[in-house]
Image (tube, rainbow, N blue to C red):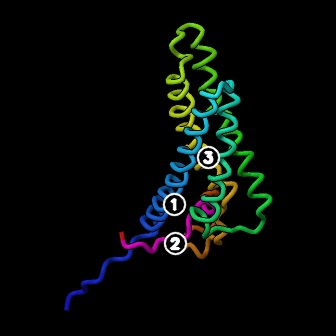
Amino acid sequence: MPDNSTPQPTGLRTRFRALIHELSKFGTVGAISFAIDLAIFNVLLHAGVETLVAKTISTVIATTVAFTGNRFWTWRHRAHDNMARQYTMFFVLNAIGLGIGLSCLAISHYGLGQIWPALQTPLADNISGQLVGTAVGTLFRFWSYRRFVFRDTTPPDQLGTGQSSGRHAANVVSPAPVRDSA
C-alpha cells in the first residue's frame, strides 16, 4: 500500500515558511501603521505644521501601534521577559528607521528641492518620505526588530536543523508557529 501522507518539509523549508509567515504578519502590522502614519502626516501638513515635525509626530504615533501589533501578534511566540527593554529597544531602532525616512525626505525637500522646486510639493514629500523613506526604513526595522527586540531564545539543539552554534542560530524561527494549512 503506497504512503499518501504529505512529506514533512525539510529544516530549511520549515524555517523559510516560518520566515514568510512572520514577514506577512510584520507586513500587515506595517501596513496598518503606514496608513496611520500617512493620514496623520498629511493632516499635519495641511494644518501648516513644518514637514519634518509632521513626519516625526506621525511616525511616533504609528510606532506605538506597530510595537503593540508586533509584540502581541507578529512575534508573540518569542521571548517577552522584559517589556521595558523591548519597548526601549524598539523605539531606539525605530528612531534609526525614522532617521532613514527623514534623511530621504530632507534630501528631496531641502537638498534637491533647492534645484527643482517641484520636489518641495506635498506630492514629492509623500513620495520621498512615505514611499522611499518608509521602504528603506522598513527593511532596517524588520531585520533589527527580529534580531534585537523580539529575539528567538530557542536553544540551537532544539531547532532540529543540526546547527550547534553560530550567529544564525539566534535568528532561526522555531517551526512551532507554522500551523496554517495554506
Kindly state the secondary structure of the residue where label 1 is placed: helix
Find disc 3 in the rendering and name its residue: 141
Q: Which label number is shown at residue 177?
A: 2
Q: CA distance from mark 1 to mark 3?
A: 13 Å
Range shown magenta: 169-181
User: How many labels sit on residues?
Assistant: 3
Residue at left offset 29%, top offset 83%: 5
Residues under numbered marks 2 and 1 in contact, where contact means CB atoms less than 8 Å apart: yes
Q: Point out residue 149 in the picture as x, y percentages from the top left corner.
A: 69, 56
Q: Amino acid at mark 2?
A: Pro
Q: Point out residue 52 in the picture as x, y percentages from the top left corner.
A: 68, 27
Kindly state the secondary structure of the residue where label 2 is placed: loop
122 vs 28: above or below: above
Q: Point out residue 64 in the picture as x, y percentages from the top left corner.
A: 68, 51
Q: Is residue 179 magenta?
A: yes
Pick whichever of labels 2 and 1 is earlier in the sequence.
Answer: 1
Q: Is residue 155 left or right of residue 119?
A: right
20 vs 93: above or below: below
Residue at left offset 53%, top offset 16%: 119
Q: Amino acid at mark 3?
A: Arg
User: What quarter of the picture does the N terminus occupy?
Assistant: bottom left
